[in-house]
Image (spheres, rainbow, N blue to C red):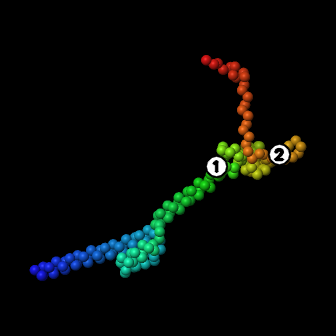
Amino acid sequence: MSESLNDFLLIATVFAAVVIAAFWLAIVMWAYRDMRSRSRDPLAQFLVAILVFLLNAPGLFIYILLRPRETLSAAYERSLEEEALLQEIEERPGCPGCGQRVQHDWQACPNCHHRLKKACVNCDYLLELPWNICPRCTVSQVSYTSDGMIATNSRHVQPSEPDPIDAKWVASQQFD
């Protein structure tokens, strides 16, 4: 009976050794693959595999403490998100009066009525307020008052008066 017990213990020991060896190799492979997803440096990937191979569980613990925080794909996605946000901020300027986002082709801010651009007196191309000449048609934008002074434009847009109602048109309409 002691021989069968010895055989059983031998088989159990061999089985346990195979399981431990497989677990050990699995840890080494996992650490190597994890480092490949976190770094492009082949030397770092190799050193991590050697560290975990030689030190096993303590080596894995050291690797987990020292490994890069994010994977390469997560860093790439984060950089894409940051770039998209920066591009969105750059694409839509803000109103200098109230800070609201405005379009490039708006002449005035709809929120605070701050004048953003002016139209060229010749070709209606939208110009920045400080510009004194149109880059498209090269016509001067400086206007003079009757006493020879340079006229300045207000930074705020005044609401225009509505057109007067045409009495003839109203009379021509038939009301039921």
Q: Residue at x 38, y 78 (%)?
A: 58
**Left or right placement of residue 134 versus residue 16 in this view:** right
**Left or right placement of residue 76 versus residue 25 in this view:** right
Q: Is residue 129 visible?
A: yes
In this view, the residue farthest toward the right is 147
Residue 25 image position (x, y, % from top left): 33, 75
Residue 110 image position (x, y, % from top left): 66, 43
Instruction: Say which quadrant the N terminus sits in.
Output: bottom left
Q: Which mark is residue 151?
A: 2
Report the front residue among 144 and 153: 153
Choose top left, top right, bottom left or bottom right for residue 43.
Answer: bottom left
Instruction: Say which quadrant the C terminus sits in.
Output: top right
Residue 153 vertical position relative to residue 5 in the rendered view, above or below: above
Q: Which mark is residue 17?
A: none
Instruction: Tell me which numbered mark, 1 or 2, is placed earlier along the sequence.
Output: 1
Dot 2 alpha-carbon crowd within 10 angstroms: few under 14, some 14 to 19, many 20 or more: few
Report the front residue among 137 and 34: 34
Q: Residue at x 22, y 78 (%)?
A: 13
Amino acid on which the number 2 mark rests in the picture: Ala
**Left or right placement of residue 24 versus residue 115 in this view:** left
Q: Which mark is residue 100?
A: 1
Q: Residue at x 47, y 74 (%)?
A: 41
Report the front residue among 93 and 126: 93
